[in-house]
Amino acid sequence: MSKPLTDQEKRKQISVRGLAGVENVSDLKTNFNRHLHFTLVKDRNVATKRDYYFALANTVRDHLVGRWIRTQQHYYEKDPKRVYYLSLEFYMGRTLQNTMVNLALENACDEAIYQLGLDMEELQDIEDDAGLGNGGLGRLAACFLDSMASLGLAAYGYGIRYEFGIFNQKIVNGWQVEEADDWLRYGNPWEKARPEYMRPVHFYGRVEHTPEGVKWVDTQVVLALPYDTPIPGYRNNVVNTMRLWSAKAPCDFNLKDFNVGGYIQAVLDRNLAENISRVLYPNDNFFEGKELRLKQEYFVVAATLQDIIRRFKASKFGSTEVVRVDLTSLPDKVAIQLNDTHPAMAIPELMRVLVDIEHQPWDKAWDICTRTCAYTNHTVLPEALERWPTDLLHNLLPRHLEIIYEINQRHLERIAKLYPGDSDRLRRMSMVEEGPQKRINMAHLCIVGSHAVNGVARIHSDILKATLFKDFYEVDPQKFQNKTNGITPRRWLVMCNPGLAEVIAERIGDDFIRDLDQLKKLLKFVDNDSLICDIAKIKQENKLKFSVYLEEHYKVKINPESMFDVQVKRIHEYKRQLLNCLHIITLYNRIKKEPKKDWTARTIMIGGKAAPGYYTAKLIIRLITAIGEVVNNDPVVGDRLKVIFLENYKVTLAEKIIPASDLSEQISTAGTEASGTGNMKFMLNGALTIGTMDGANVEMAEEAGEENLFIFGMRVEDVDAMDKSGYDAMEYYNRIPELKQAMDQIAGGFFSPKECDLFKDIVNILLHHDRFKVFADYEAYIKCQDKVSALYKNPKEWTKKVIHNIASCGKFSSDRTISQYAREIWGMEPSLERIPAPDDPRQ
């Protein structure tokens, strides 16, 4: 019998990883050694693994630079419409392997590194995640950048270069402990500082109304220093740019008004200005009205708009002379997409630039503004909506507050004409919320200041029109659209699950990587024993690999034959990790009651970060770890049930666990999860979904057939009805014995014997003020989980459902999402054509 292939030999056989030509490999080795010696000034004898990583990163980056320059040249010459994706978050993860995939360099680099006596996976593990995001919203922005480049759109991602990204999570004695994410400590080989494009950003000051116009004076200036990261499209030679701004104090900061503290203190105080780009706010779906956060939001917007207008006014490549002076055509050449309300200050800032600086009349400026901007809403949770106190705005951005008041007045005049005497409608639709402290509703500002407003899944967009933005929809129905989220199949299939990508390519070719709809060709193989066998085999290999990782990192021995039941996402009450906990306890109690029964073995994994100030979410993590301590150490249970809390869930961990998962938990209360995108990643990677009819789950069930998902629980209509009639948790508690037993165990200290009332606050929430109605879906969830267990015992039927799911994933490519944004919002046409490579002769 031939000995099993090594990982390296296995990788070599995967065609989707690109060809390893001899010249290619030889050049890569030469360049690797050149970088080691001349860029890093290291001899092979003293070089560390990190040196080798940087040498490889620089070698791969060399392949980007020519294409990057050529792409930007191409844009200047063709002068296409450009789209600017403004986001406070870009959750990029690692860059090295994604770049190799998109440039078709993976096998060549693998071979070169192997010939140099090094291990590719070891080098890849040295790279830190760029964790400049909290969760779905930031990761969506990253997928969109990949798709915009792959579709040949002239696109730019604009955000903040946080010095510290999302915190690293440690679990200490069962509790979450945060530690700073110093991701730039060793430098970032993928970014290029561009000091020549530094821009001033103004804060504070006062407004003067003069005969020559309005002046914003006596401001404090902070400089915005841009760092550019190349964004390669998939094998089309396009390389777009993500530009992240870093805050820098000007040289004369605090020195011009010679302060009593003196020179030393003035130089030390530069930190105050530079704190703007220091750290990402770690809240997901929660608004924290802090001045520093508002500064961040305005900082990215002001710097970006200066850049947009500079680029609009200049024309040919490398030219700085102004050629366009008339800003009337701005909407024909520029689209600005606001990723949630975080960059909403772009609307008053664009108006300030057009009216105060470019001296456009208000009505013309407003027409330009609304035709340029579009707004994506990401949540309906009231605690997540941004409502900034007017006194904060008046202090920090006095001119912008004036402009917002003017926008609001004209908006309300229009509404009053349409609905004479309806003062309650005026109050509901105003951007200014009266109350103990006046606030600006940023969502209302975005709707009024944009030509398009979209939700991120069909059900979410429908809820916006029916509830949150109902008044606005009645006035401007043409503004409201849906753009169901998607994920990039490059990172989330080809890169993280090459074995599955190859099995698919063997059946239908590899065009599905750029056109995911082609996966439906797999439907004709749904009963094909060879495919069923291959898909099951890849899943088992992925599970074995992840099992090894788990045993190394968590010191738990797990049963790779067990069902891998996974819920990974931010910890939040609406995502109902507590419902998962109740199922775990119920399963545990059943095994204890009938230990001889043939139970379906499960390894249940839950992972995700809790916002540092979110007490309940941190307590939920403690409950999960406590349940694990009891379950995992009970000899009666053995390896039939294991509970693992996955520490420090991030993009790179997702890339390991998703390909190894059997069951994906998407169990939010119907009407609360705007879309979800993790759900799509699991579906594409051969897991089955247990979920509610919420977010994109609805469309997943529609595409794959509801019989191929495990759908349970209340629909939106049922939740609404229950809100009207009243939700009585005690009724369920008293009626359902298994639920009562589980709750009594949590409350009585069964999972916290040293501190019996540790979880009293969770018990109190669930029994007396649970907005998310966990008990109302408990029975349906348990029954549905029983169906999951039964099907898992029949591997062939399980795998057939898996194939149905994979074949129905086409809609959930971010390429489809971005094509719709381009055509229906931005007025741009996506293209699959390749542009010439740098070494091709120019057309």
Image (tube, rainbow, N blue to C red):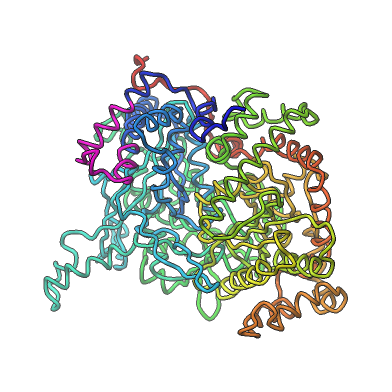
Left or right: 215 as drawn, with respect to 560: left
Between 711 and 263, the one lying in front of the other is 711
Between 568 and 474, the one lying in front of the other is 568
* Furthest-front residue in this view: 1
Specify whether residue 52 is painted magenta: yes
Between 495 and 404, the one lying in front of the other is 495
Which quarter of the figure has residue 668? bottom right
Left or right: 164 as drawn, with respect to 212: right
Residue 485 seen in the current view: no
Between 282 and 320, the one lying in front of the other is 282
Q: Position of residue 494 (x, y in %)?
A: 55, 35
Residue 385 seen in the current view: yes
Q: Which residues are magenta?
A: 28-56
Which quarter of the figure has residue 605? bottom right
Q: Quadrant of the C terminus?
A: top left
With respect to residue 524, does 129 lie above or below? below
- Which is the main secondary structure of the residues drawn in magenta? helix
Q: Quadrant of the N terminus?
A: top right
Which quarter of the figure has residue 752? bottom right
Left or right: 544 as drawn, with respect to 839: right
Specify whether residue 566 is painted magenta: no
With respect to residue 167, does 474 lie above or below? above
With respect to residue 509, does 369 lie above or below? below
Q: Position of residue 386 (x, y in %)?
A: 52, 65
Q: Position of residue 514 (x, y in %)?
A: 57, 29
Q: Position of residue 577 (x, y in %)?
A: 66, 65
